[in-house]
Image (cartoon, rainbow, N blue to C red):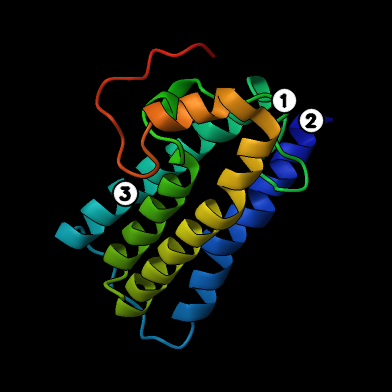
Amino acid sequence: MLVLRALFFALLMPGTVVIGIPWLLLRGQPSRDVRLDFPAVIGSALVIAGAATLFVCIRDFVVSGRGTLAPVDPPRKLVRVGLYRHVRNPMYLGVLLMLLGQALFFESAVLGFYAAVIALLFHLFVVLFEEPSLRGLFGPDYERYRASVPRWVPRLRPWGGRS
């Protein structure tokens, strides 16, 4: 049942941000010719890297955290494995990589602006809601993790704290 809930929220939340809204934003714009130029190749690579990041993080939420990415069904254990040993918010970074990749692929300033707005909204959500919630749920364990792992810029060497 947990896997089904995780799949549902993975399709609903990131799917809306990464597929639904960009599709609506691009609807009125002229189509881009599909060709293998620099923006298309780099954009595609970013979308693939972002999707892989998101997939790995969702898996870690289910397996290690026993929850999903939705605020209404969060992990029951603090997730400090995999990419979470390098940066506290890799799932958001994965979504932003996909959005930036789409902006490059479609050579769309509108999608670039949308990605910037989403980045700002993610930051505000993390700072104003998520971090205080995690502090309340996990107390000193989260504080130690927060002090050792950066919020947005990944550390090169993984944090060695206990999972």
Residue 114 position within the rendered picture, expressed as x and y whole percent measured from the top left: 42, 73
Circle 1: is it few (<14), some (14-19), or many (20+) Cα within 10 Å?
Answer: some
* Mark 1 vs mark 3: in front: 1
Residue 38 position within the rendered picture, expressed as x and y whole percent measured from the top left: 15, 58
Sooner in the amino-acid sequence: mark 1 or mark 2: 2
Name the side, left or right, on which 18 lies relative to 135. Answer: left
- For image coordinates 61% across by 62% down, the residue present is 16
* Mark 1 vs mark 2: in front: 1
Check disc 3 and report the residue beneath it.
46
Q: Describe the element under mark 1 as helix, strand or loop.
A: loop
- Where does the C terminus fall, quadrant-wise? top right
Residue 131 position within the rendered picture, expressed as x and y whole percent measured from the top left: 56, 44
Q: Describe the element under mark 3 as helix, strand or loop.
A: helix
- For image coordinates 37% across by 68% down, the residue present is 116
Check disc 2 and report the residue beneath it.
2
Q: Nearer the viewer, residue 28 or 158?
A: 158
Q: Nearer the viewer, residue 150 or 67?
A: 150
Residue 58 position within the rendered picture, expressed as x and y whole percent measured from the top left: 59, 35
Task: Inspect the image, locate mark 1, and give the three-letter code of the amino acid beneath it.
Answer: Arg
Check disc 1 and report the residue beneath it.
66
Sooner in the amino-acid sequence: mark 3 or mark 2: 2
- For image coordinates 36% across by 28% down, the residue present is 86
The answer to whether the residues at label 1 and label 2 have Cβ atoms under 8 Å apart is yes
